[in-house]
Image (spheres, rainbow, N blue to C red):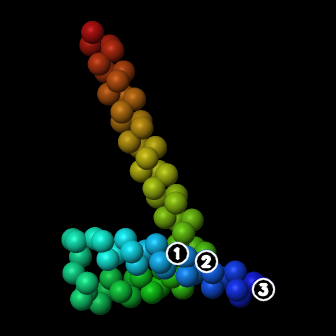
Amino acid sequence: MIASLYFCGALASSGIWLSAFLKDESTPKSDTASWVVLVIATILWPVAVPLAIRERSTKNNRLLLMESSLDLDIVTES
Protein backbone atom coordinates (compact mmCIF):
# COMPACT_ATOMS: atom_id res chain seq x y z
CA MET A 1 0.00 0.00 0.00
CA ILE A 2 2.71 2.50 0.97
CA ALA A 3 4.85 1.53 -2.01
CA SER A 4 1.96 2.09 -4.41
CA LEU A 5 1.34 5.56 -2.94
CA TYR A 6 5.04 6.36 -3.29
CA PHE A 7 5.09 5.28 -6.94
CA CYS A 8 1.88 7.17 -7.74
CA GLY A 9 3.41 10.34 -6.30
CA ALA A 10 6.67 9.70 -8.14
CA LEU A 11 4.82 9.19 -11.41
CA ALA A 12 2.76 12.35 -10.97
CA SER A 13 5.69 14.54 -9.96
CA SER A 14 7.99 13.18 -12.66
CA GLY A 15 5.31 13.80 -15.28
CA ILE A 16 4.93 17.41 -14.22
CA TRP A 17 8.68 18.01 -14.04
CA LEU A 18 9.34 16.22 -17.34
CA SER A 19 6.75 18.29 -19.18
CA ALA A 20 8.17 21.51 -17.69
CA PHE A 21 11.68 20.42 -18.64
CA LEU A 22 10.69 19.60 -22.20
CA LYS A 23 8.88 22.96 -22.61
CA ASP A 24 11.88 24.89 -21.27
CA GLU A 25 13.87 26.20 -24.21
CA SER A 26 16.75 27.63 -22.16
CA THR A 27 18.25 24.22 -21.34
CA PRO A 28 19.47 21.82 -24.01
CA LYS A 29 17.75 18.43 -23.85
CA SER A 30 21.12 16.68 -24.24
CA ASP A 31 22.43 18.15 -20.95
CA THR A 32 23.18 15.13 -18.76
CA ALA A 33 23.13 17.11 -15.51
CA SER A 34 19.54 18.20 -16.15
CA TRP A 35 18.41 14.61 -16.64
CA VAL A 36 20.25 13.52 -13.49
CA VAL A 37 18.50 16.25 -11.46
CA LEU A 38 15.16 15.18 -12.93
CA VAL A 39 15.76 11.55 -11.93
CA ILE A 40 16.95 12.49 -8.43
CA ALA A 41 13.95 14.78 -7.93
CA THR A 42 11.65 11.96 -9.01
CA ILE A 43 13.23 9.51 -6.57
CA LEU A 44 13.20 12.03 -3.74
CA TRP A 45 9.79 13.52 -4.53
CA PRO A 46 8.55 13.41 -0.91
CA VAL A 47 11.28 15.94 -0.14
CA ALA A 48 11.45 17.75 -3.48
CA VAL A 49 7.75 18.55 -3.85
CA PRO A 50 7.35 20.37 -0.50
CA LEU A 51 10.59 22.27 -1.15
CA ALA A 52 9.37 23.34 -4.59
CA ILE A 53 6.03 24.45 -3.15
CA ARG A 54 7.78 26.41 -0.40
CA GLU A 55 10.10 28.07 -2.90
CA ARG A 56 7.20 29.14 -5.13
CA SER A 57 5.25 30.38 -2.13
CA THR A 58 8.20 32.42 -0.89
CA LYS A 59 8.71 33.88 -4.37
CA ASN A 60 5.03 34.85 -4.61
CA ASN A 61 5.11 36.42 -1.14
CA ARG A 62 8.15 38.49 -2.06
CA LEU A 63 6.43 39.71 -5.21
CA LEU A 64 3.32 40.66 -3.25
CA LEU A 65 5.43 42.54 -0.69
CA MET A 66 7.24 44.39 -3.46
CA GLU A 67 3.95 45.33 -5.11
CA SER A 68 2.43 46.52 -1.86
CA SER A 69 5.50 48.60 -1.02
CA LEU A 70 5.35 50.15 -4.49
CA ASP A 71 1.68 50.95 -3.95
CA LEU A 72 2.51 52.59 -0.61
CA ASP A 73 5.29 54.62 -2.25
CA ILE A 74 2.86 55.90 -4.89
CA VAL A 75 0.27 56.85 -2.24
CA THR A 76 2.79 58.68 -0.05
CA GLU A 77 4.20 60.61 -3.02
CA SER A 78 0.78 61.94 -3.99
Look at the numbered disc 1 and give the secondary structure of its residue. helix
- Check disc 1 and report the residue beneath it: 13
- Check disc 2 and report the residue beneath it: 9
44 in relation to 60, above or below: below
Depth order, front residue of 19/34? 19
71 in relation to 30, above or below: above
Q: Which residue appears at 31% of the width and 86% of the height?
A: 33
Which class describes the residues within 10 Å of circle 1: few (<14), some (14-19), or many (20+)? some
Q: Which residue appears at 41% of the width and 36% of the height?
A: 65
Quadrant holding the C terminus: top left
- At label 2, the amino acid type is Gly
- At label 3, the amino acid type is Met
Q: Residue furthest top?
A: 78
Q: Which residue appears at 54% of the width and 69% of the height?
A: 49
Look at the numbered disc 2 and give the secondary structure of its residue. helix
Q: Quadrant of residue 29?
A: bottom left
| Residue 28, position as x, y percentages in the image | 21, 81
Quadrant holding the N terminus: bottom right
Which of disc 1 and disc 3 is earlier in sequence?
Answer: 3
49 in relation to 64, above or below: below
- At label 1, the amino acid type is Ser
Specify the label residue 25 is tagged with: none
Specify the label residue 1 is tagged with: 3
Depth order, front residue of 45/18? 18
Q: Quadrant of residue 74?
A: top left
Look at the numbered disc 3 and give the secondary structure of its residue. loop
